[in-house]
């Protein structure tokens, strides 16, 4: 369970169940000098076996003195509820919007990663009044520019009944499975993966019914072509992209930026970093978020 100095766990109810989030409520972030009208900075994690708000836990405390920081576990992940269902794109578009409406007043600044970042773009297109700016790490629908992830061998394999549950329990939700995924697919360098990260992902992956959201993701049920939507985005946006991302190359992000330079104002690639620079190089990620928040919110 994620426990950070000065943060506490709260929850709201969404249309799909309880959604847990972490926010700063105590010293050293909250005291008599704390401004009551601080702007909200929302951190949203990506998807994968064992994903949760832990993904941003090395980053978001750095912003707690200046902003009202909120970091939820999305429905089906972490400590939030895990409905037994085949998750669809609309489930996350709806619950992300509901969460913002319930926890935020005024337009919110969002930091998000991977497929969740792509969902945020779609929510921002439909409800631009909710958003002030976006800082996105490798936003991708995973079927972008006509690529169909759901037809890949692994997605087809995980679509086979019984095989899917077996693969999850023996190949994903184990210490070895989590470590292998992080070292080979998520990080650029395996020596940057330490046991605390593995333990956090494993704890999330072993929550009751955690396999439902994870398998929906791996099957490709949540994937879509973000290039079909990106032109409609109007919220000021910056993109950060690890050059060694295993799933989507930086060229995907550059193409997004070229399609809509009015909204996507900054694109920064990072050398020798994989899919989650927020865990692999948190100090660099903090610096870039600070930079882009300043540039986007002038």
Image: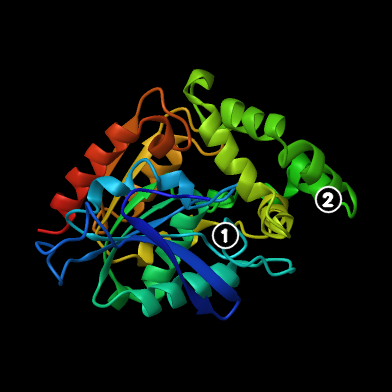
Residue farthest to the right, as pictured: 162
Locate residue 272, reporting x and y percent.
40, 22
84 w.r.t. 105: above or below: above
Left or right of 52 on screen, residue 241: left
Left or right of 154 on screen, residue 103: left
- Name the residue carrying label 2: 165
Residue 108 can be seen in this image? yes
Left or right of 198 on screen, residue 132: left
Q: Please tell me how crowded label 1 is: few (under 14), some (14-19), or many (20+) other residues with Cα within 10 Å.
A: many
**Quadrant in the picture for residue 180:** top right
Looking at the rendering, in which quadrant would you find the C terminus?
bottom left
Identify the residue shown where x is 26% and y is 53%: 261
Query: Closer to the camera, 45 or 155?
Result: 45
Mark 1 or 2: the one toward you: 1
Which type of secondary structure does the marked residue at label 1 adopt?
loop
- Name the residue carrying label 1: 79
Query: Closer to the camera, 179 or 109?
Result: 179
């Amino acid at each position: 369970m994620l426990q950070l100095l000065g943060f506490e766990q709260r929850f709201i109810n969404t249309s799909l169940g309880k959604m847990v989030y972490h926010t700063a409520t105590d010293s050293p972030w909250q005291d008599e000098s704390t401004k009551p009208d601080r702007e909200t900075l929302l951190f949203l994690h990506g998807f994968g076996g064992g994903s949760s708000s832990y993904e941003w836990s090395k980053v978001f405390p750095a912003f707690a003195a200046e902003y009202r920081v909120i970091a939820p576990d999305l429905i089906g992940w972490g400590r939030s509820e895990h409905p037994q269902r085949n998750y669809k794109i609309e489930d996350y578009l709806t619950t992300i919007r509901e969460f913002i409406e319930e926890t935020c007043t005024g337009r919110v600044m969002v930091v998000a990663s991977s497929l969740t970042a792509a969902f945020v773009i779609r929510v921002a297109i439909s409800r631009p009044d909710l958003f002030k700016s976006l800082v996105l790490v490798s936003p991708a629908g995973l079927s972008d520019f006509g690529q169909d992830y759901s037809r890949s061998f692994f997605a087809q394999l995980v679509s086979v009944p019984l095989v899917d549950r077996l693969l999850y329990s023996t190949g994903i939700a184990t210490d070895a499975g989590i470590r292998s995924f992080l070292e080979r697919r998520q990080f650029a360098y395996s020596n940057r993966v330490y046991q605390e990260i593995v333990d956090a992902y494993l704890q999330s992956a072993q929550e009751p019914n955690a396999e439902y959201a994870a398998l929906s993701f791996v099957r490709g049920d949540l994937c879509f072509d973000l290039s079909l939507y990106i032109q409609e985005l109007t919220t000021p946006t910056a993109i950060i992209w690890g050059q060694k991302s295993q799933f989507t190359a930086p060229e995907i992000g550059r193409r997004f930026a070229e399609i809509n330079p009015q909204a996507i104002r900054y694109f920064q690639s990072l050398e020798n970093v994989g899919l989650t620079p927020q865990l692999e190089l948190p100090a660099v990620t903090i610096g870039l978020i600070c930079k882009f928040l300043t540039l986007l919110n002038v």
